[in-house]
Amino acid sequence: MKIFAGRPAWVTWTIAFAVVGFVVGEALCASTFYLTSHELVGTAVMFLALCPPSIAALGLDNAGPVRAVIGWQFIAVLNAALYSAVAYVCGRVYEQATRRSTRSSRVYTALVNWFRPWRDGPP
């Protein structure tokens, strides 16, 4: 995408994962309201695996609909922050790995060029 052209990997990953984390939080919010309105119960494993901050939804049991939506918005923002923190770390590790491999290939090329006069035998 042209939006992320020229940016470091960690910036791209952080923004993309933050958006995904927020969307996942909002989808789980919608799922919660759908299940609640139909008097069904969702699986806690799905909620905790995709959105660990959703454990805070336990405090929203006695909240009205407006307060529950506000609470879930806060949970979605926390989930976006969690996803972006993981992406930031992964992006930095990826950058360090690619920088290190580029640096090591430069070192290898420099060593090959330095030893080139002695490749055919001693001078």
Image: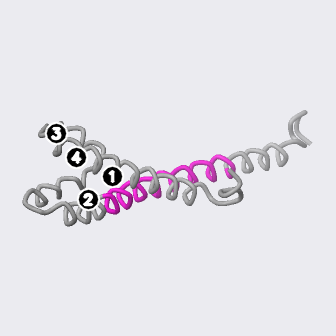
What is the C-alpha distance between the residues marked 2 and 1? Answer: 8 Å
Q: Position of residue 100 (x, y in %)?
A: 61, 51
| First to last magenta residue range | 76-103
Q: Which mark is residue 25?
A: 1
- Viewer-side label of 3, 2: 3
Please give the name of the residue rendered at 92% of the width and 42% of the height, measured from the top-left corner. Answer: 123
For image coordinates 44% across by 57% down, the residue present is 18
Which residue is located at x 28 percent, y 51 percent?
29
Task: Indicate the amino acid at tag 3.
Answer: His
Please tell me whether residue 109 is drawn above or below residue 40 in the rendered image. below
From the image, tell me which residue sits under label 4.
32
Give the main secondary structure of the magenta stretch.
helix
- Circle 1 packing at 10 Å, graded few (<14), some (14-19), many (20+), is many
Mark earlier in primary sequence (4, 1):
1
Of the residues under marks 3 and 2, which one precedes in the sequence? Answer: 3
Residue 72: which disc?
2
In the image, taking residue 104 as reference, residue 58 lies left or right, namely left
Residues at marks 2 and 4 touching, judged by CB atoms closer than 8 Å? yes
